[in-house]
Amino acid sequence: LKVYQNLGITLLEFLSMGKLTPEDILEQVEFEGIHHLHDFKKAGQGVLLTTGHFGNWEMLAAAINASGIDGHFVVRSQSNPYVDKLQNDIRHSAGLNVIRAEDIRPLVKTLHAGQLVGILPDVNAGQKGVFVDFMGRKASTTKGLAHFAWKLNCPIVPSAIFRKPEGGFKAVFKDPIYPDPEMTEKEAVYSLTVQHTAALEDFIRQQPDHYFWVHRRWKATPPSN
């Protein structure tokens, strides 16, 4: 029941998010570990931010930008053009920069420019994904986040946003995960995916009702060979 309550609240928050100013957002969000992002910004280092379909992930993105980080966030286009336009109009009104998942060129350009790109990799990627342990079962996970981290030598910062019992949110940013340049691409993609998935799992175990359990996360099964 709490899962569906969280989803309902998140939907209502998202629909009104475009009306919030950066100051409004910062009044609602407490930060822990955001210095990692600001350190990378000062150094001109591109960074990949990862979270999951957890809590109000759209608010997390808005809070990052409200804090002074010029973040860009990868989104999937919706099949319904009216829903797609509504979602992205709200995002733009909330100050978010959107990168379409169908075109990776802006993603690479943004990272080369020393900016932040946010990706939600916790989606079933079928047999094209990499299978790693997630909540006790093997789950197919998209390779993109780990691939770009290795290819462009960018750190990954795991993050999540929690609802506070007294109201408002707490955005948490873990220590960066760095790619190992000595690894092959296959080794690095697997290692990085294991690490960022474990970070998400840790967040979920802290607040299970925040996760988007309605997604068929374990739909694909690992190949038998």
Image: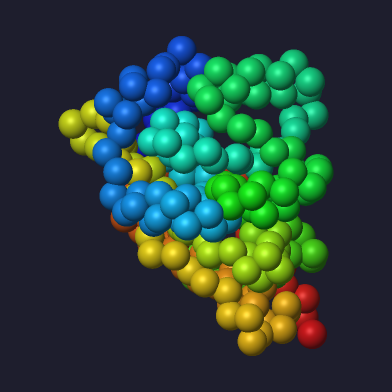
Tell me which residue sits at (71%, 19%) in the image.
85
Numbered marks: total = 0
Residue 27 x %, y %: 27, 26
Quadrant including the C terminus: bottom right
Residue 39 in sight here: yes
Residue at figure coordinates x 73%, y 78% from the top left: 185
Q: What x and y, as percent, mark residue 102?
A: 81, 43
The residue at the far top in this view is 19
Q: Is residue 213 visible?
A: no
Note whether 2 is above or below 108 in the view shown.
above
The front one of 220 and 117 is 117
Query: Residue 59 sits in which quadrant?
Result: top left
Name the image quarter holding the N terminus: top left
**Viewer-closest of 114 and 186:** 114
> Is residue 213 positioned above or below 164 on the image?
below
Which residue occupies 57% across, 48% down? Answer: 115
Compared to residue 137, the image places residue 48 above or below, namely above
Q: In this rendering, is residue 141 above or below 207? A: below
Observer-nearest residue: 193 or 182? 182
Q: Residue at x 79, y 65 (%)?
A: 127
